[in-house]
Image (tube, rainbow, N blue to C red):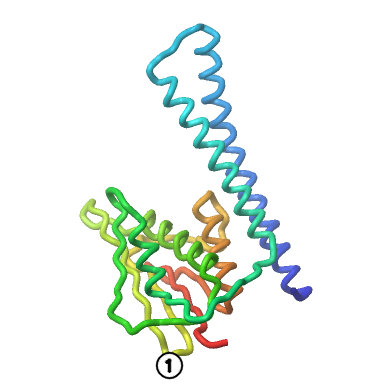
Amino acid sequence: MSRMEDSETLQDLGRASIQIVHDLKNQLNGLKLYATFLRRRIEKGERPDDEQETIVKLIAGLDRAASDLATIVEYGRQIELKKQAGFEVQKVLRTVCSGFEGPGAQIVVDSSSDSVQGSFDPLKLTDAFKWISAAAIKNRRNEDEEAKPVSVKIAAVNNQQATIEWSGLRKIDHDPFRSFVGSEEIRLALAAKIIEAHGGSAKLAEDRFVVQLPLSE
């Protein structure tokens, strides 16, 4: 890694730390509130119906805080790729998108294009696609109070570059790949870093998340 890259990473980490500390502080304040409520109930010897719900919220908050910290630690490390030739981008995208279930988790992959293959790290790129797809679902556009499915389309130009677009998003007034605000955007920042390590880019373009990946070394 060059000195310039080291400097840019440190600057990113500095900005990230401010946002993350603020977000974690809010999470921990919430956990303290839940814990205090639970302690008072226990001290009184009461066992209300909502006690289990309070415990679940407490554990979920702790899990989220631990996950955020693990993600930012990974972001701070140099990305080491274990590339495999013949990585089928469409196949992995379809697998990732089919994993989202439940109300409001609609995401449709346009598989009309020819097979797009390249040399990529399967595990890391799959994680990046998963995080971007989850963020796209959360930020999908509402029309007439009904959430529309997110559409994912992939295209290749002369077998040199693949462009992947998650469209149908609502307007976002900041760059979610660089803001580090909350769990979702911490993961998006790491997804962008993984894609950039492959020589590509990830950005917000109006109502779309756009990822570009080189298909040749």
Q: Which residue is mark 1?
A: 158
Under circle 1, the secondary element is: loop
Q: Where's residue 37, x and y in %?
A: 51, 19
Quarter-wise, where is residue 49 in the image? Answer: top left
Choose between 174 and 155: the one closer to the eye: 155
Q: Where's residue 66, x and y in %?
A: 60, 43
Quarter-wise, where is residue 117 in the image? Answer: bottom left
User: Which part of the image, by quadrant, shows the C terminus?
Assistant: bottom right
Please, which residue is most extreme toward the bottom here?
A: 158
Mark 1 burial class by Cα count in 10 Å: few <14, some 14-19, many 20+:
few
- Seen at 59% across and 34% down, the residue is 28
Residue 208 against residue 52 in the figure, above or below: below
Quarter-wise, where is residue 165 in the image? Answer: bottom left
- Seen at 56% across and 36% down, the residue is 62
Q: Amino acid at mark 1?
A: Asn
Please, which residue is most extreme toward the right here?
A: 3
Residue 151 against residue 154 in the figure, above or below: above
Choose between 14 and 211: the one closer to the eye: 211
Choose between 42 and 173: the one closer to the eye: 42
Please, which residue is most extreme toward the left here?
A: 144
User: Which part of the image, by quadrant, shows the N terminus?
Assistant: bottom right
Q: Where's residue 188, x and y in %?
A: 52, 60
Q: Where's residue 42, x and y in %?
A: 52, 12
